[in-house]
Image (cartoon, rainbow, N blue to C red):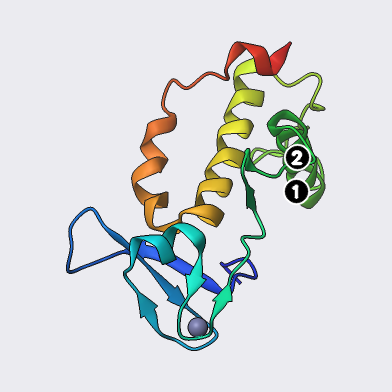
Amino acid sequence: MSDVARTYRVVPDPEHAGSRMILCRLCETVSTHPADVAELYCPQCDHFHEDPLMNQSGPRHDMTYVEMARSAYSSYVANVVGKNHLGLPLPSWHDLPTHRQIAWECAVRQVEICLLTPEEADAAESRWTGWTPPPEERA
Ligand SMILES: [Zn+2]
């Protein structure tokens, strides 16, 4: 449940620092060949895996991060029936202070890291302190 429907994983190669290997979940074998890793290829299966989340221009989003943050916040508000932990009403997304909207965007971006590179998730958590979105995004 913590993983997307991927038929492979690319993970660090424990025997070669800085290198990665591809683990095929169809046959449960590993290839450390750099070309196999780069092309998501399993030589055992003779199969090119497809990444459901990535394409050449990066993650494939139909929604912007801001739209995803708004949707996540609305889901949160719905689940807590519109009240904060003190029982006070939560504001709508539009009335939420900008720094709170940015905090929700951080949460959404962290979820993306959890999906794409779960091995980096723990280390990434503290990097959001003081983060602000790139200016072009909020135009
Ligand atoms: Zn395979």
Is 12 placed left or right of 54 in the picture?
left
Q: Give 64 or 90, whichever is nearer the viewer.
A: 64
Report x, y in % for residue 32: 31, 70
Is 34 placed left or right of 77 in the picture?
left
The residue tagged with tag 2: helix, strand or loop?
loop
CA–CA distance between discs 1 and 2? 6 Å
Report x, y in % for residue 121: 42, 50
Within 10 angstroms of label 2, few (less than 14), some, or many (20 or more) residues?
some
Quadrant assignment for the N terminus: bottom right
Q: Amino acid at mark 2?
A: Lys
- Mark 1 residue CB less than 8 A from any atom of ligand 1: no
For the point 58% across and 47% down, the residue is: 112
Is 126 placed left or right of 52 in the picture?
left
**Is 132 above or below relative to 42?**
above
| Rendered image quadrant of residue 125 | top left
Q: Amino acid at mark 1?
A: Val
Report x, y in % for residue 123: 34, 45
**Is 81 above or below relative to 130?**
below
For the point 45% across and 57% down, the residue is: 38
Label disc, if present, on residue 80 of the rendered structure: 1
Check contact, mark 1 vs mark 2: CB within 8 A.
yes
